[in-house]
Amino acid sequence: MSNQTPLNPDALEVAAKALYDHFKNQAANDGDSWPELEERDEVGHGIARDDAEVAVSAYLDVAQLVVNSVEERDQLPVGTIARSAYWLVAVKSANGWLVAGYSKEFRILDLPFTVLDRPEVDE
């Protein structure tokens, strides 16, 4: 989980509840008994939260490319949207990077940074 985006706790709780409910419904559909005690539900929800955090973290590690080298940065297409380690959001232009909140164009974007979106490019 290196270079990982911090997880939103509220979103993580929603994911954990969905995962917990999924397992609970799956157990009911399989005819298995599911603990009805509130104490056990709290333990189960804690486990689901941990599972959800692992799953979401693994997804983000793959889905959000972290650029660590000049070569990787230079290969990104115009229109790529990125977030720097300082949480600056920028769009790659033909001549550099347009950073939100700044009127000038920057020649480079400091490494490392996370690619949030990139345009479809014909190969």
Image (cartoon, rainbow, N blue to C red):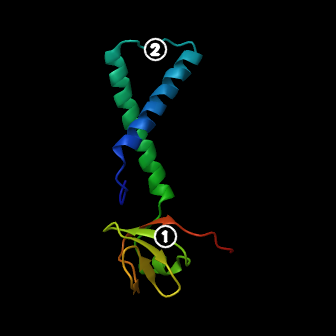
Viewed as shown, does residue 50 lie left or right of 92?
Answer: left
Residue occupying the far right of the picture: 122
Earlier sequence position, callout 2 versus callout 1: 2
Residue 65 is marked as none
The residue nearer to you, when weighing 79 against 26, is 79
- Distance from label 2 to label 1 (Cα)? 46 Å
Amino acid at dot 2: Trp
x, y percent for residue 120: 63, 69
Amino acid at dot 1: Ile
The residue nearer to you, when weighing 31 against 101, is 101
Tell me where residue 97 sits by quadrant: bottom left
Question: Would you place residue 77 above or below residue 116 in this image?
Answer: below
The residue positioned 45% from the left and 49% from the top of the image is: 58
Tell me where residue 112 sits by quadrant: bottom left
The residue positioned 41% from the left and 43% from the top of the image is: 11
Question: Would you place residue 51 above or below residue 44 in this image?
Answer: below
Secondary structure found at label 2: loop
Residue 34 is marked as 2
x, y percent for residue 29: 59, 17
x, y percent for residue 96: 46, 84
- Mark 2 vs mark 1: in front: 1
Question: Would you place residue 115 above or below residue 104 in this image?
Answer: above
Q: Quadrant of the C terminus?
A: bottom right
- Mark 1 highlights which residue? 81
